[in-house]
Each structure stands twice: as structure tokens, then as C-alpha cells.
């Protein structure tokens, strides 16, 4: 048995999203059928990003397990012969049997295309959203800059989300214009349900002058979906790629209105240890901040997370599923330790 990783591109116009739906055709369903026919096995792919109905992709990731004797790098050629013209596998390769596309640290990049002109262009109707009123790209870019960093994106999440946590980190948020085409580009460590489309809808409100760029920060801090703009239509959105997050930075500081902490990760590779110093944090944010950080560093390969609070909590305690215990005698005083295998339940 081997695990195969696929990079998949598709035009999502005629599909009800990625994930299998009982009442509509999906990308996952079509891939499963084509791969099952190719291998003679019952194949069920696992997708990295479960894109919505009508959303496109240039580089979504999927994996599946198979006993086929077809060379891994040739599977993409073989399966493409069985796929419709609006779905195409770009590459195939064998990966570690434990590789899971949704359980590894990665960066996702999305682009949203806005066709900003007086009249629609029929040629672009399937991959861009037509807007006839003028949009101020400079103001949209100023507003987008407020999104960079680690924030609670509750204001940009549709109801029905299954996410355990609404904190995400955005590394790039840009708005550019080329002729009559405006491109909103977002790169982050993950996105909530409809998050990109709600951000784009909000940026368009800024672009048409409904509110100033600085209002974007107020929307973030409100953590209230009603404060943000409407959700932009699906046809303009494309998942560009999903790539490994890379080696964690030796020193990382995350700060916003609610939290301020530093991560020291220089010993991650050698000692499997990360240090977290909490400079300040609202009490209601503390537990989920620690849990979120622990999950991330353990995913990156750490075995221990050492935590120190400048306005600290004393004694042993639980933080979500994890158990924080004071460092043993001889260790750094004032620190608490969370071990990867040390759960509170």
C-alpha cells in the first residue's frame, strides 16, 4: 500500500464544491470515480482545501491510498484520461504513509478577481466578478493591510463553520490593479468558512467609499459577522496553491488587541522544545491561545512547550486538553511545561 499526493486544478463552475454532496456533483466525487476506475480499487481521496461551490483551483492537494502498480509519477497522466475537461491533475507523487494534507503546517494562497469596468466582459464571466462602479484600489490596499498578522477573524466567518478556533494568521494581503482587473491576494495558515469572500466583499465596500480603510480594524476587533460586508460571489475566487509552511522562525512575536506573546523556537529541531512568553493576554483569551500554540508547535515537531507568563498563574492547571505543570526543581523558575503526550483527560 502506498500513499499518493495529487495536485489538482479545476474550474469549479459546474460543481457543488470539493466535498462530496448527496444532491450535487463535486470535485471529490469525480476524482474518486476516476481513480477507482483506473486502479480497480475503492478510492476515497482526502482533500487539503474543501472549496465551496463555484470556487476554482490551480493547486489544491489530495491524497489517496492504493496498491496499484502504476508508477506514482504516471498516475496523473493516466487519471487525466478519465477526467472531464474542467478537472486536471497537475502532478502525482508518492508521499509518506502518515502524510495528511489537513494535519500538516501549510500556507494557502487565494486570489479573487474583480472585473472593474463599465460593461461586463462575457469572456471573463466564469472567473471574475463584474463590478461597474469605480473602486479605489489604494484605499482597498490600505484596508487589506490591517488583516496581516494573527487575528480573530470571527467577523469574516459565515455561520455553520465547524472550526474549533477562529484565530488565523495572514502573511500577505494585497490589492493590485492591471487594466480593468483588480486582484485581491491573501496568503495565510488557514481560512475560515467563506472568510476570503467576506473579506473581498468588505474591501469592495471600502473601495466604493462606504466606509474608510481604518474601519477594517474596527470590524476585526468587533468579532461580529454583522459588522463586515457581504460575501462576494464564488466565481471570482481561485485557490492558487498550498505549500509547506517551511521551517519555523527562531523568534516570533504575535500581538494584537487581545494578546501579546513571543515564541522562541531556536531549540525546536535539536531539543524538540519551544518557549512561549506571554507578555499580556485578556483572561478570556488565555486558554485558547495556549491550546492553539501547543497544537501548532507539536505539529511542527516539538515535544514540549514551556510557558511563562509575565503576570503569571501559579500552580498546576489545565488548558483545554493540555496539562500545565510547574517546571521541576533545577529547571527555569516560573516556567510551566506542556508535553505533547500530557493531556488533562
Image (spheres, grey):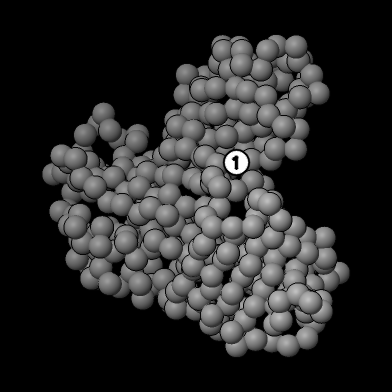
- Please report the residue visible at 75 percent of the width from the left and 57 percent of the height from the top: 303
Give the vertical position of 114 relative to 268 (above or below): above
**Residue marked by disc 1:** 48
Task: Say left or right for 252 vs 48.
Answer: left
Identify the residue shown where x is 77% and y is 60%. 340
**Among the 4 quarters of the image, the one containing residue 237:** top left
Above or below residue 267? Residue 259 is below
Residue 179 percent across, percent down from the top left: 15, 39
Name the side, left or right, on which 265 lies relative to 294: left
Quadrant occupied by the C terminus: bottom right
Q: Residue at x 46, y 72 (%)?
A: 255
**Does residue 245 appear anywhere in the picture?**
yes
Foreground: 84 or 309? 309
Q: Residue furthest right?
A: 345
Residue 120 lies, in percent from the top left, at 20, 38
Badge 1 element: loop
Q: Residue at x 49, y 59 (%)?
A: 169
Amino acid at each position: 500500500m502506498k500513499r499518493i499526493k495529487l495536485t489538482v486544478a479545476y474550474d469549479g463552475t459546474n460543481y457543488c464544491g470539493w466535498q462530496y454532496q448527496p444532491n450535487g456533483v463535486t470535485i471529490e466525487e469525480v476524482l474518486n470515480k476516476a481513480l477507482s476506475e483506473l486502479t480497480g480499487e475503492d478510492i476515497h481521496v482526502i482533500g487539503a482545501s474543501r472549496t465551496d461551490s463555484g470556487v476554482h483551483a490551480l493547486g489544491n492537494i489530495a491524497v489517496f491510498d492504493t496498491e496499484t502498480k502504476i508508477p506514482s509519477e504516471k498516475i496523473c497522466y493516466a487519471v487525466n484520461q478519465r477526467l472531464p475537461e474542467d478537472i486536471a491533475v497537475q502532478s502525482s507523487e508518492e508521499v509518506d504513509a502518515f502524510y495528511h494534507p489537513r494535519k500538516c503546517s501549510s500556507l494557502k494562497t487565494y486570489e479573487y478577481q474583480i472585473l472593474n469596468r463599465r460593461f461586463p466582459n462575457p469572456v471573463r464571466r466564469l472567473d471574475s466578478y463584474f463590478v461597474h462602479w469605480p473602486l479605489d484600489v489604494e484605499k482597498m490596499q490600505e484596508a487589506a493591510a490591517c488583516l496581516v498578522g494573527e487575528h480573530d477573524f470571527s467577523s469574516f466567518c459565515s455561520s455553520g463553520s465547524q472550526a474549533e478556533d477562529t484565530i488565523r494568521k495572514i502573511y500577505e494581503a494585497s490589492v493590485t490593479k492591471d487594466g480593468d482587473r483588480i486582484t485581491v491576494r491573501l496568503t495565510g495558515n488557514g481560512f475560515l468558512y467563506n472568510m476570503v469572500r467576506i473579506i473581498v466583499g468588505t474591501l469592495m465596500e471600502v473601495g466604493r467609499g462606504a466606509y474608510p480603510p481604518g474601519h477594517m480594524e474596527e470590524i476585526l476587533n468587533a468579532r461580529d459577522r454583522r459588522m463586515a460586508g457581504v460575501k462576494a460571489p464564488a466565481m471570482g475566487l481561485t485557490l492558487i496553491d498550498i505549500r509547506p509552511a517551511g521551517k519555523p522562525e527562531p523568534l516570533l512575536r504575535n500581538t494584537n488587541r487581545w494578546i501579546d506573546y513571543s515564541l522562541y523556537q531556536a531549540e525546536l529541531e535539536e531539543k524538540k522544545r519551544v518557549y512561549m512568553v506571554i507578555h499580556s493576554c485578556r483572561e478570556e483569551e488565555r486558554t485558547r491561545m495556549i491550546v492553539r500554540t501547543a497544537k501548532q508547535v507539536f505539529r511542527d515537531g516539538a515535544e514540549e512547550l514551556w510557558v511563562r507568563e509575565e503576570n503569571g498563574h501559579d500552580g498546576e492547571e489545565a488548558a483545554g486538553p493540555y496539562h500545565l505543570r510547574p517546571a521541576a526543581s533545577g529547571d527555569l523558575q516560573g516556567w510551566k511545561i506542556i508535553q505533547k503526550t500530557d493531556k488533562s483527560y
